[in-house]
Image (cartoon, rainbow, N blue to C red):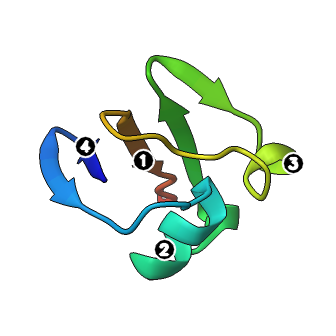
Amino acid sequence: MKLKINGTESEMQDGFTVSGLLETLKIEPARVAVEVNLQIVKKCNFNEHALKDGDAVEIVNFVGGG
């Protein structure tokens, strides 16, 4: 399936959830916010939220500092 991840087209296998996508991209789920098709996905739903062909996914990393 094709996904648009942070504005870049990517080809992924079918059946990914948000958790599966983050794992594949080696992104720590605790440190990001995820939006799919302009809707924020709650962390508690990462395992259940299935991605579909054509979805637009935005992944935002939290940055600390001072």
> Which residue occupies 46% across, 56% down?
63
Task: Classify residue 56 by image quadrant.
Answer: top left
Using a 10 Å C-alpha cutoff, classify the residue at mark 4 as few (fewer than 14 neighbours), some (14 to 19) or many (20 or more): few
Residue 64 image position (x, y, % from top left)? 52, 59
Using a 10 Å C-alpha cutoff, classify the residue at mark 3 as few (fewer than 14 neighbours), some (14 to 19) or many (20 or more): few
Q: What is the spatial separation of the Cα atoms under label 2 and label 3, in whole angstroms?
A: 16 Å
- Mark 2, residue position: 27
- Mark 4, residue position: 6
Question: Does 39 appear above or below 10?
Answer: above
Residue 33 image position (x, y, % from top left)? 57, 44
> Which residue occupies 44% across, 22% down?
37
Element under label 2? Answer: loop
Contact, mark 2 vs mark 1 (Cβ under 8 Å): yes
Toward the viewer: 59 or 9?
9
Could you tell me the amino acid type at mark 2? Ile
Toward the viewer: 16 or 63?
16
Task: Classify residue 54 by image quadrant.
Answer: top left
Contact, mark 1 vs mark 4 (Cβ under 8 Å): yes
Q: What is the spatial separation of the Cα atoms under label 1 and label 4, in whole angstroms?
A: 6 Å
Question: Which circle's residue, 3 or 4, is located before the other in the chain?
Answer: 4
Element under label 1? Answer: strand
Element under label 3? Answer: helix
Question: Which circle's residue, 2 or 4, is located before the other in the chain?
Answer: 4
- Mark 1, residue position: 59
Could you tell me the amino acid type at mark 1? Ile
Which of the numbered marks, if any, corresponds to residue 44? 3
